[in-house]
Every structure is written in C-alpha cells, then in structure tokens.
Amino acid sequence: MRSKIERAQRGPSGVEVILGALLSVVIGAVLGAAYLSVKPVPAVKEIPKDAAAGSVFYIEGLHDSGQGPEAGEKLRTLAAGGSVTLTETELNSLAGEAAKPQPSVAAKPGDKAAPAAAPAPPGPQAALRSDEQMTDVDRRRIQTALARLGYYDGKIDGIFGPESRAAIRRYQHELGAEMTGRLNATQASRLIAGQ
C-alpha cells in the first residue's frame, strides 16, 4: 500500500510518459485516417460558388512549372503594396525562380572588392483594400481573423452583416480608432496580420 502512495506522489516514470505520447500519436493517426475515409476531401477543378463555409477541397496544381507567367506581374503588384491571390502554380513558379543560383563573376587578382550591398528593406505585407472594395475572399479573411482574435463568433460567409459590423467596431475600439464598423485598408491589413 505504501509503495502505491509513494509512486502516486512521484508521478509517471519517463518510460510511461514516452509510451503515453506514442500511443497518443498512433491513436491520432488512426482516427485521422478513419475520418478521411468516412469524409474524404473532394478533388475539384475550382472551388464551387455555393460551397458551404468551412468546406475543404483539393485542387490539383499543374505539373508543368513553366505555367505561371502572370506570377511576375502579381509579384510586382504585391511589392507595390497591392493585394493579390496566388495560385499553386504561380507560387511554384516564383519559388523556382528564387531557387535558381545567381551567376557570379570571378574576381581577378588585384581587383578591389566591390562594396557590400545594403540590406534590402523588409517586403511589404499583402495590403487589403478598404471595406467597400473588398472581395468576398477578403471579407472571409476578415471574418476569420476577427473570429481568431475573439471578436466574432458568427458564420464565415463573406457577408458583413450586423454581427460582422459589431465585431469590427469592437476591434476598432481596441485600436482606439473611430468605431464605424467599416474597415479602412490599414485597419484591415493590421487585422489580417493579427495586430
């Protein structure tokens, strides 16, 4: 009896903790596989217009990595502070360009070393438009961010109804801004960034 009390006071041993963690991972993997077999993710060519909030779809990307020519234009728009939506193909295209080795010029003996380049300023965050100019996707991102921060518990539907407007006013109150219930571009970008 005394050994049980002493063991209870010490807690589980290291081996018991490791076995418990491994068992948790295995159970999680089995339950996840069972869930996906019961409710598989549908493969679609594009997201349906009437998709319910919280729906998950698989959209297969292109296999040809040279199919992202408009990605460069979107990158310039993003660098200028605009808002863009990138497809998987465009992301792959941009990542491929970034991974390419840059040509280097071998220095000749006696040449002076070139001065070090100044570090590049941090890139701009993807700016959102003001409330009136937002797309449905932008509004869903706003609702998701408001929910994540605890201001909104309504439906993520891309419609700014009374609940969304009240949540925006609560967020604006925390910012110390005028509580209009309508976001300007700066407030929307800060909200998405989690500030």
Image: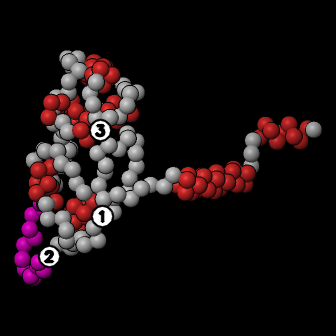
Residue 171 appearing in the image: no
Residue identifier under label 3? 141
CB under 8 Å between discs 2 and 1: no
Tell me if 153 is positioned left or right of 114 in this view: right
Residue identifier under label 1? 61
> Could you tell me the amino acid type at mark 2?
Ser
- Return the residue found at the far left: 111
> Could you tell me the amino acid type at mark 1?
Gly
The residue positioned 10% from the left and 57% from the top of the image is 73
Tell me if 71 is positioned left or right of 144 in this view: left
| Inter-mark Cα distance, 2 to 3 | 42 Å
Q: Quadrant of residue 143?
A: top left
- In the image, residue 155 sits, relative to residue 32, either above or below, namely above
| Inter-mark Cα distance, 3 to 1 | 23 Å
Q: Quadrant of residue 129?
A: top left
Range drawn in magenta: 104-117
Q: Position of residue 173 (x, y in %)?
A: 28, 18
Residue identifier under label 2? 104
Is-magenta flag for residue 106?
yes
Disc 2 vs disc 3: which is toward the camera? 3
The residue positioned 20% from the left and 44% from the top of the image is 126
The residue tagged with tag 3: helix, strand or loop?
helix
Is-magenta flag for residue 61?
no
Count residues near mark 2 (Cα–Cα under 10 Å), then give few for <14, some for 14-19, many for 20+.
few
- Which residue is more in the foreground, 184 or 22? 184
Disc 3 vs disc 1: which is toward the camera? 1
